[in-house]
Each structure stands twice: as C-alpha cells, then as structure tokens.
Amino acid sequence: MLRRFTALSAVFAALFVRVVSAQPADAPSLPLDELQPGQVGEVWTVFRGTQPEAFKVEVTGVLRNALGPGKSLIVCELTDPRVQKMGAVAGMSGSPLYIGGRFAGALSYQIQRFETVRHAGFTPAADLVEVRDKPLLGSRHLADAGPAPQSRSGNADLQPLRPVFTLGGLSPAVADLFAPHFSAVGLSAWTLGGSTQGSSGNDPAAATLGSSAARAPAASLRPGGAVAVALATGDITLAGTGTVSRVDGDRITAFGHPMLSLGEVELPMCASDILTILPSQMQSVKMANTGAVIGTITQDRLSAVSGRLGAGPSMTPVEVTVKPLRGAARLLKFSVVRQTQLTPMIVAAGLSQAIMGSNDAGLANGFRLTSRIVFPGAEEIGFKTVYSGPTGFAQGLNEFILGLGANLQNPYAKTFPDQVSFTVEPLETNPAVTLDQFQLSRSTAAAGSIVQITLGWRDWQGAAHRDIIDLRINPAWTGKQLEVILAPGRALDELSGRPRVISAAELRSFSAYLAAMRDDRPTDGICIAVVERTALFSDQTVATPEAPGSIERIARAADEARFRRREAFLPLWEKHLLEGKLINAIVRRPLSVVE
C-alpha cells in the first residue's frame, strides 16, 4: 500500500512538473484588436511559495479608453473555482494572461466588490511594452514629487490592485503610530509581512545594497513569479509584492499598474516568497516574505513598473544603537530609498522600532537621542535631544520627519544623506521639571558689581532644587536698559532674531543652509541671557547688530532677498543650565546698569 501511494505521488509530481513547464516562454504579444469574447486564457501567478501556477479565465471583452485616451482594459471572468471564490488578489498584480500561447496582458484591476460573478481587468500587452521600452533620462530627472494619492471612489467600481506594502521588522505599535504618515503619501501598509534579508549578523552591505552577495539567482524570476519592490531593506523592510508580467533578458516588467506613480525611480527589486492568500470579500491579499535584492526598478508608470536584474540601487544606510540602562547595546541596521517624502518617514519608523519594539520600556521616563546625518562631501549635521515619555517622543518624531524632509527638499542642492546614525540612551528619571522661582537680587546695578540670579525648580517627583548664579555687570553695559531672559534654547533663538523657518532666498548654498541649522541652541535645559533690544542686519542668517545705514543700503540694493533687517534681542551674556532636563518657561526681568 505504501509503495502504491509513493508511486501515485511520483505520477502526480511528474504531471505537476509538466504543467509548470507548459508556461509560455518568450511568448509573442497578442494585439488588442484580436481579442474576442469567449476566448479562454491562462493566468499565471504564485499561490504559495515561489512556483507559478495557472488558472483559467474567459474573455468578456475590451473596455475601451477605460483609464484615459488609448488606455484600455481587458475584462475577463475568473472561471477557475479557486479564484472565483477570492476574486482578484492584491499581490496578483502583473500576473500574465496568455491566450493561444500569446501574451495578452497583465492582471491589474479589481472590478467592483461583492459581485456574484468575479471579473478582473487586465492591462494590454502593448502598454506594458511601452513602459519597458521607456528611455531613462538619468538621476537628475528622477521625480521629486511625492507619491500620487490613491483613488478611493465611493463605489470602488474599478480599483487597481495596488500592492499592500508589508512591514517587516516593525511591531504593531510602531506600525499604528506611523499609519497616518504612510496613508498621507498613499501607502497602505500592514504588519502581516516578513523578511528574510535582515542584516543582523550579516554584512549590511550585502543585505541592503543589492550587492552580488545578496542577490538571488536571476534565473529564478520568470513570468508569473512573485516579485517585490522595496522602500526599505535590512532589519526593517517595507515592500510591496506583485507579480512578474514579462522577462526580456535582464529586463523585468511587473504589476500592470503603478506602484506609487513616482515616474522614473531607483528602487530595490527583491525576491518574494508567498506564504498564503488571505481571502476576503473586500480585498483578498497575498501574505509574503520579502527576500534578497535582485535588481533595480527604474520606472513606476500608469501601466506597469519595470527595471533590470542585477545590482540594487544606491540607498541611504541607517544605524540605530540602543544603549539600555542595563545589559548589552542593540544595533539595528537598514537602508532606505532616496525619495524626499519617503526617506524621512521610513528613517523615523526604524528609529521608533529601536525604541518601542523592545522589552526595555524606554518610553516610561524618557531618553536622550543623539543623531548624526552625513551628506556628500563630508557635510554633516547632528543634534542631541532629550524626550520625556510617550507624548514628547511623538512630538519629537513629527519634528524629525519635518526637519529631515526640509533638508532633503532644500532649494540649493538635490542631495540625500550618505549615512544616518542614531544613539538612543534611556533615562532613569523623567527629565521634565517645573519652574518655581526666577529672581534677580536687584533690578538696578552698578558697573562691575555682582547681581545674584536665583533659580528654583521642582523635578518630576516634586523634590525642590535651587541654584544661585553670580552675574558680574560688564562696564560696557552702563547706561543701557537691559533684560534678563529665562527661556528654552529654541525660544531664545526666536527672541534673538533667528526665525523658525529660514527663507530660501536668504541663503546661497547647501553648506550655508547646514551651517544655519547648526547654530541652534540646545533643546534641553534652560538658557539665562542678558539682552538688549536692537536692530539686526543679517547676511545669509549671520546677524550684525546696528550695521551702518550706508552698508545696509548698498547691500540691500545688490540683493534685497539675501539681506534682512529684524528687530530682536541681542544677547550680551548667556549661560546654559539644567542640561538633560526639560523645562517650558519664558520669564523676563528688567535690568538697568548705572555708573
């Protein structure tokens, strides 16, 4: 009995191999005008694993100009019982349709929902060839615009089977935190996805940059096979899975519709392993593991995505080191695509995972974050910031996304970081403090004398603290009406004439832009400053107090936008206190200096 069962298994296995080998190779295209209702075709896709299988469809007809002039859709009934139950599946995007041994198109659109007889739309073969043959204009022509918003019509009669981007390496809590950010740029992301390309314990270059060590065999990719387009690779993976429509040498065409409508791109093409299909009346979805980088996607157009097998694109490597209060440090490594809106968001998501996706409960009290961003030409910028618990962290994330986004979208140079690194250090106590007292020993002082400044505050648990600062009165302040200001660094930046938003016209280079960013005062602690009100004349944000009118007139006549005049406070003396603490208070005290 056992021998008979084994023999039958061998027969079925042989039949399965013959069915798979019957998949057309280098099939010629079938012109749209030769399609006739009632024709029976085969669609190839992966139901599980990496092996494509065929299912039957019947041509209903051609929906002319469905997506615009000259952009038609082939409508087919999904006659295979397996597919009729689940309908067109997100992840089947690009599954090739063969009729009479010729390539007719690629499955790409869902038609209605809850219909009693399942149909699907197919992008014609000629439209996919158009995308494949589109010439590359070079990196300077890469799209700067963000992803196009996804259509969400009320009836959803005709929807592209947009790939559901799966998040590998992100906890559900982090995914929920970033869901609004992803949705804002047209990304529908969920955490039911995995990755086999984590860089921990491996060479990060091989795992994240598409080097030869990381590439899967090119011969394994064929029409009907699963393929993923990634936005992040490594310990953090964000990728959309679809299906290969055509393989022409090393050129790959897939999806049958746009991914994010980015135009000319440089995105990692990755292998993909399908775990299963999750059926749903709303939208069935393939669950997949994203594999190694096997090439580069270069076009993201209306009718398809396309690219070449081989090395992956240039990406930005990110490292996050978490130093817990006890135990060994953890290191998270991943790489992100270079796109002005997506890069900051994905970097922030990886940083959030390092903080939230562990058993350290790092948000309970707060943490110190040190960041370093290195741009081409060894230009770099770094910050040290202290956060207090979950509320402060959420606010800090938004600030980081906006800040890095502003850096990437600067008007001086199209640039992306060569490297981004973070160090996260949890705090043993909450850094938030409350101001109790800010007092001067006297408001009128003689030159050379000492005024005592008393600063009192309470920490998170209510314990009282007091500090006395001796302020020696500079004789140069004689006769001036001054103020002593207590304020956080950012507030003092604004009071002293530094705008929160710098106009592009005020600067002339990316180096000057980064230099302006480095001038910020510390974000933690509190600043005490002796200031006088003055008029600041600034050149590329570098301010000169009370510049002679003749110089100002000449300069502004030469370049009105570059030179600015502002009424502001000029710090004559300042001191930074309570480093590592967070205090939100602005207090001003008058000070007169006499002989």
Image: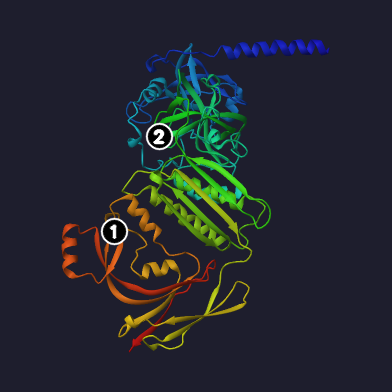
Secondary structure beneath label 1: loop
Q: Is residue 147 left or right of residue 457?
A: left
| The C terminus - image quarter | bottom left
User: Which of the two residues, 447 or 113, is positioned nearer the viewer here?
Assistant: 447
Tag of residue 265 = 2
User: Which of the two residues, 172 or 501, is positioned nearer the viewer here?
Assistant: 501
**Which residue in the structure is indicated by mark 1?**
540
- Give the amino acid at mark 2: Val
- Residue 556 in the image: state x and y as whole percent: 19, 61
Tag of residue 511 = none
Instruction: Answer with mark 2 or mark 1, whichever residue precedes in sequence.
Output: 2
Q: CA distance from mark 2 to mark 1?
A: 34 Å
> Answer yes or no: do the residues labelled 2 and 1 have beta carbons within 8 Å?
no
Residue occupying the point 43% across, 27% down: 306
Which of the 4 image quarters holds residue 15?
top right
Q: Is residue 164 visible?
A: no
- Residue 363 in the image: state x and y as whole percent: 61, 59
